[in-house]
Image (tube, rainbow, N blue to C red):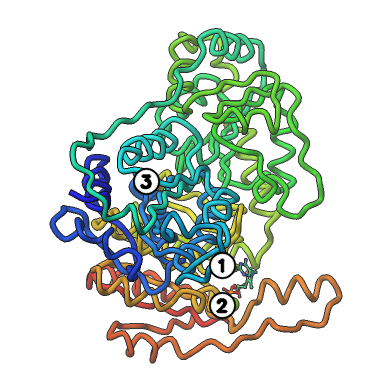
C-alpha cells in the first residue's frame, strides 16, 4: 500500500463516499486507490466547481465535502470556494499534491510550482497540513475531521508531496478517530437559565450554527415565548411557526424587535454584517443583555457577550431546556411573543417593498411546488430579496453565497454537489444570467454524475443589481451588461431540456414537469 492508497482507505473509514476532483500528472498516484474503493469520483469542469460542489455536498448532507486537485493552478482554482466555505463554516477537505520535498521554496521552475503553496493555503484554510512521512497521514486526517466535528468547521487543506505520495505506507492504522465538541459548561448553562428566568421579553437569534438543532430551538422558544429571528443560513428552522421571524436583522422592523427585547440569546450566529448590516448603515446595535452560544472560542471573543456558552448549539439548547424545567412561569409571555413576532413579520414584509415582494414570490413558488426542496441560490435579485425575507420549509434547505464571502457563480456547482448528496430531494438552483455564466459548464459534470438539478435562471440580461447600485451612487453604468447566451440553445448543446417562461406564474407547472422528468433542465424566467 502506498501513501496515496492509504489516504483513500482513510477517507473511506471517515465515511467519505464522494470526492470532487480534476486529476493531473501530479495526482496520478492519489488516484491509484480510488478505482478499487467505494468512493465515487465526480469530475467538475473547473476546480472552483470541485470545491463549490464539495460545499453544496457538505451543506446538504451535513458531512464534510472532499475535493482532489493538483499542485499550483488546481489548488489556486479552489481558493474562492474555500473562502466561501470559511465564511459560512462549511466542512471541506481539499487534498492536493505539491512538488517534491527537496525542490520546495527554491524557485527552480518545476511544473505547477508556487513560491509557497502551504503558506498561501494557510491564509484561507483553517489548517494546511503537509505530509512529509507516511506515518503522519492518520494524524493529519484525524486533525481535519476533528476540526470539522469539534470546532467551527471550514476548509482544511492536506498536501502530499510528489516524492511522498508513492512511498510505501504499510502498517498504518487506517481507522477513523474523531473527537466531538466540548460539552457545555454547566455553570454557564445555569447562568443562562438564570438570565432567562429574569427576562420578561426574551428573543432568540438563530444562525447557521443552529441548523441542526431545530427541536430544542423550537422547544426553548415555546417555553420562553420568545420570537426567533433567523439569519439567511438559519432559514427553514421553525417554518411557519408563530414565533419565527424569517427576516433579516438588516431590516428596521427586525432591528426594532431585537432592540425591544430585554434578553437576547444568540445561537450559532456570528453577527456578520451581511446579515445584520446589509446596507452598511451601522444601525444594528449589539444587544446589551446577550447570551451567545457558539462552538468556537475565537468567534465568541470577537463579539463579546454578557454570557458566552462555548458548545454545539444542539447540546447547549438541550442542556438549557433540561435545566429550565417546566414552562408555567413563562406562559404569559407566549402570546405576547407571537404577537411581537407577527408585527415584525408584517412590517418587514412591507419594508422590502413591492419589487422585492414579487421576487420573494418566485422563491415561494419553488418552495410551494416542491416541498422539502433544497433551493441553492447565487447572487441574483430574487436571492437577495429572499435573504431579506423568506420562510423556507426545511432547515438547511435554503443556502446561497450572497451573504458572507459573496462569491458569484457558487449556485450551480453547489446545487450539483447537493443533488449528489441527497439524490431523492428536489434540488433547485436559482441563479442570475450573470452568475450562471461563471460556472455553467458544470452542467456537463451534473450530467456525467447523474445529478438532477433544475436551474432556474433569472434572466434580466446583465448585472442588474450592480447596475442599480451604480445608478443610486450617481455613476453612469459601465460594465454591467454582459450579453447572456441563448440558454435554450445552450441546453440543446448539453442535450437537456429547457423552457423559457414569461413570468413566475408559469413556474409551478414547469417545475412539476421537471420534477416528473427527474432530469437536469433549465427554466429561464425572462425578466423585463
Ligand atoms: C466572484 C465575484 N465577482 C463579482 C462579484 C460582484 N457581483 C455581485 S452580483 C453580480 C452580478 C450578478 O448578475 P446576475 O447573476 O445576472 O444577477 P442580477 O443582479 O442581474 O439579478 C456581480 C458582478 C461577486 N459577488 N463575486
Ligand atoms: Mg442578471
Query: Where's residue 436, x and y in %?
Result: 49, 75
Q: Is mark 2 within 8 Å of ligand 1?
A: yes
Q: Residue at x 59, y 27 (%)?
A: 297
Q: Is the CB–ligand 1 distance for label 1 below 8 Å? A: yes
**Cα distance between the residues tagged 2 and 1:** 8 Å
Locate residue 308 relative to residue 160 in the image: left or right: right
In this view, the residue farthest toward the right is: 474
Report x, y in % for residue 390: 54, 52
The reply to whether dot 2 and dot 1 touch (C-beta < 8 Å) is yes
- Identified at 50% across, 43% down, the residue is 127
Q: Helix, strand, or loop for circle 3?
A: loop
* 157 w.r.t. 470: above or below: above
| Numbered mark located on residue 64 in the image | 3
Residue occupying image coordinates x 38% and y 91% = 489
Quick check: which quadrant has ligand 1? bottom right
Residue 434's disc is 2
Q: CA distance from mark 1 to mark 3?
A: 22 Å
Label 1 residue SS: loop
State whether residue 484 is above or below residue 178. below
Amino acid at each position: 500500500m502506498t501513501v496515496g492508497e492509504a489516504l483513500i482507505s482513510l477517507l473511506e473509514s471517515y465515511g467519505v463516499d464522494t470526492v470532487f476532483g480534476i486529476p493531473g500528472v501530479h495526482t496520478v498516484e492519489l488516484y491509484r486507490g480510488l478505482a478499487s474503493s467505494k468512493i465515487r469520483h465526480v469530475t467538475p469542469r473547473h476546480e472552483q466547481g470541485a470545491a463549490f460542489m464539495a460545499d453544496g455536498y457538505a451543506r446538504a448532507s451535513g458531512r464534510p465535502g472532499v475535493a482532489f486537485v493538483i499542485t499550483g493552478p488546481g489548488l489556486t482554482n479552489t481558493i474562492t470556494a474555500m473562502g466561501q466555505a470559511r465564511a459560512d463554516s462549511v466542512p471541506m477537505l481539499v487534498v492536493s499534491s505539491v512538488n517534491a520535498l527537496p525542490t520546495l521554496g527554491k524557485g527552480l521552475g518545476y511544473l505547477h510550482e508556487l513560491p509557497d503553496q502551504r503558506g498561501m493555503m494557510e491564509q484561507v484554510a483553517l489548517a494546511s497540513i503537509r505530509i512529509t512521512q507516511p506515518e503522519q497521514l492518520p494524524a493529519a486526517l484525524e486533525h481535519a475531521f476533528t476540526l470539522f466535528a469539534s470546532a467551527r468547521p471550514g476548509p482544511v487543506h492536506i498536501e502530499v508531496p510528489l516524492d511522498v505520495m508513492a512511498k510505501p505506507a504499510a502498517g498504518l492504522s487506517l481507522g477513523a478517530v474523531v473527537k466531538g465538541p466540548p460539552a457545555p459548561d454547566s455553570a454557564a448553562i445555569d447562568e443562562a437559565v438564570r438570565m432567562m428566568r429574569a427576562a420578561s421579553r426574551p428573543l432568540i437569534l438563530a444562525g447557521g450554527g443552529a441548523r441542526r438543532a431545530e427541536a430544542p430551538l423550537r422547544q426553548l422558544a415555546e417555553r420562553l415565548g420568545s420570537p426567533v429571528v433567523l439569519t439567511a443560513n438559519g432559514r427553514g428552522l421553525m417554518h411557519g411557526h408563530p414565533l419565527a421571524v424569517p427576516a433579516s436583522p438588516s431590516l428596521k422592523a427586525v432591528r426594532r424587535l431585537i432592540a425591544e427585547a430585554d434578553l437576547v440569546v444568540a445561537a450559532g450566529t456570528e453577527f456578520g454584517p451581511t446579515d445584520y448590516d446589509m446596507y452598511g448603515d451601522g444601525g444594528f446595535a449589539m444587544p446589551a443583555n446577550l447570551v451567545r452560544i457558539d462552538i468556537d472560542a475565537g468567534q465568541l471573543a470577537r463579539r463579546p457577550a454578557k454570557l458566552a456558552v462555548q458548545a454545539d448549539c444542539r447540546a447547549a439548547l438541550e442542556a438549557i431546556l433540561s435545566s429550565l424545567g417546566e414552562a408555567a412561569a413563562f406562559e404569559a409571555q407566549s402570546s405576547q411573543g407571537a404577537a411581537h413576532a407577527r408585527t415584525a413579520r408584517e412590517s418587514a414584509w412591507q419594508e422590502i417593498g413591492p419589487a422585492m415582494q414579487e421576487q420573494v414570490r418566485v422563491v415561494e413558488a419553488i418552495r410551494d411546488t416542491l416541498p422539502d426542496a433544497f433551493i441553492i441560490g447565487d447572487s441574483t435579485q430574487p436571492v437577495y430579496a429572499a435573504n431579506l425575507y423568506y420562510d423556507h420549509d426545511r432547515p438547511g434547505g435554503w443556502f446561497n453565497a450572497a451573504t458572507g464571502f459573496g462569491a458569484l457563480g457558487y449556485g450551480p456547482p453547489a446545487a450539483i454537489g447537493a443533488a449528489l448528496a441527497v439524490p431523492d430531494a428536489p434540488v433547485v438552483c436559482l441563479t442570475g444570467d450573470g452568475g450562471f455564466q461563471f460556472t455553467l459548464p458544470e452542467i456537463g459534470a451534473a450530467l456525467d454524475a447523474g445529478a438532477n438539478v433544475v436551474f432556474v435562471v433569472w434572466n434580466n440580461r446583465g448585472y442588474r443589481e450592480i447596475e442599480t447600485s451604480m445608478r443610486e451612487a450617481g455613476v453612469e453604468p459601465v460594465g454591467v451588461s454582459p450579453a447572456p447566451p441563448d440558454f435554450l440553445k445552450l441546453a440543446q448543446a448539453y442535450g437537456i431540456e429547457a423552457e423559457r417562461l414569461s413570468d413566475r406564474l408559469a413556474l409551478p407547472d414547469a417545475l412539476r414537469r421537471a420534477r416528473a422528468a427527474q432530469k437536469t433542465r433549465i427554466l429561464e424566467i425572462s425578466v423585463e
